[in-house]
Image: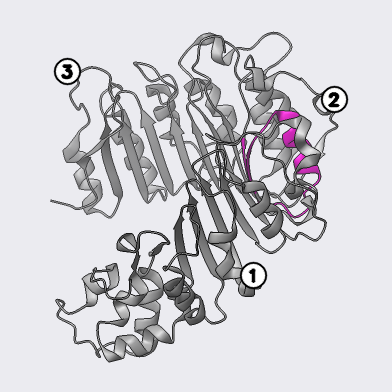
Amino acid sequence: MEHQQHDSPATAQLGPTSDFRHGSFPPKILSLILIYTVRRNIFDLHTCESSFSEASSVSRVSKHWRDVSLATPEIWAIISIRSKNAEHLPKGLKHLQLHINRSKDAQLSVDVEADDVTSDHFFMAPFQKVLARLGSLQLRAGQRNVDVNRAVQKHLSVVPNLGLDTPDLCMKVRRNDRKQITSVTFLPSLFYIRPSQLTEYSLLSSRSHLTHLHVRCTWKTALILLGDCPCIFLVHFLIPPYGSKEALPCTNLDRIAVSHTTVSSLQHLIVQVPDAFRPGHDYPFSSLTAFLNALSTPSLTNFSLLSDANQNPHSIYPPSNTDFLEALPSFLYRSSPKIQKARIEGVPISGFEIVVVLKAMRWLKDLTLGEAKGRSNKLVTTALLNLLASRALPYNALAPELTNLNLEVNDDGWDSEVLEDMLEVRFRRGLKSSIVRITPQGERWKLKLGMERLRVLQREGFAVRLVKRDLDSGKESILMGYTVD
């Protein structure tokens, strides 16, 4: 692998073809550059032709670069492994071991892609002597016969940050009381924690050490997890919509009465209701309502509410026993006056209804509002833009401290120049940047916004950007960038 010639980002920008001489960078500066540019050291343990090391590549530029690269263990500690089953240890281990040795005392970041491995022996054997230095382990298993259980049971106790991407929905891990794991990620499209298996997961048997959690679960399971995580800092919950099989109580754990939960350590909360657009989910936010009513987060600074619902009246107006529109602002008022960043996307809420939500976040500095699926704008309406542009006294204005505003809309058919008026007023009151992303429906759509007026704001120092997103492909095209013509 060492002999292959590839250009890394560092060599491409600063290497032999650049205007810089190889020795022109002081060692400390070059070391920092390498740390931020070297991102790929790939080891295909059974096809050496597919292996490539950026760290090795930069070390061949010159003697000066080699000396600096060898004195920068962080660039050798980034390791990606591609592994398949074999009868003997692969030849690629020699170069892998070289990187481990050159990483010295740096924290190892290991990414493993195992297609059909039936044992963790081949991809974890080189790390047996340096397990204490494993800072991050991301394991992606392509087949169900991968022995993820064995690998996780063996290494959870030493890896502070663990990510699992596996199609095995019934993975069980034996209890391990010695584990000190702090971060767990289950990719939502592939993994679902069933409440009946909650006590069978070693990562959940030692919840007191968790600081980050990304998991798909019912709203009651989410509250139980939060109540048992005194050090939790960031969570991303995917709560199935009301009406789906996942949301229905099916275990004794889900039938446990959940008391009100206060999580003082939580600062970043992402709540997502996936698949809310599917037929049969007429009231998808009922479970979310129960979750918000039972939770308080006094230290919250960052809040995101995400979904993919349609602009369907039934999506937002729930049955008489739930009231999402009251639960959301009530949660925000009850939780924290410190929220500075908020993102609300794909939730069929109107422009007038969002006003109460924004008033609950008085010190908001960064706001993203995204429309639910539909042909027109129900959230970012002319009325809301007028309210945001209100010249009322600061204590009556919506989000008076706002410095960044992003809008994801279905159309730009507002009243004449109302968006331009709002951005101009907000710019005078401290708004520094804004992205307006439009996803029009129909081939005959034409931009209606006044580009010249927005260009004037750009020349005055306001960073405004217009983007068109294709409805089907999601591909984006820039209508107006940050550069002033």
Q: Which residues fall within the magenta stretch?
A: 213-237
* Proximity of marks 2 and 1: CB atoms separated by less than 8 Å: no
**As displayed, is residue 453 above or below residue 317?**
below
Q: Nearer the viewer, residue 37 or 323?
A: 37
**Is 6 left, or right, of 220 in this rendering?**
left
Q: In which quarter of the image is residue 383?
A: top left
Q: In which quarter of the image is residue 69?
A: bottom left
Residue bearing mark 2 = 252
Of the numbered discs in the image, which one, if any, rests on residue 243? none
Residue bearing mark 3 = 444
Tell me what residue is drawn at x 68 percent, y 35 percent: 193
- Looking at the picture, the colour scheme in use is one colour
Residue bearing mark 1 = 131
Q: Which of marks 3 and 2 is nearer the N terminus?
A: 2
Q: Which of 275 and 316 is in front in this view?
A: 275
Q: Nearer the viewer, residue 246 or 129?
A: 129
Tell me what residue is drawn at x 73 percent, y 49 percent: 203
The kind of secondary structure element at disc 2 is helix
Is residue 398 something that shows in the picture?
no
Is 320 inside the magenta-drawn segment?
A: no
Q: Which of marks 3 and 2 is in front?
A: 2
Tell me what residue is drawn at x 44 percent, y 49 percent: 403
**Residue at the far front in the pictured view:** 87
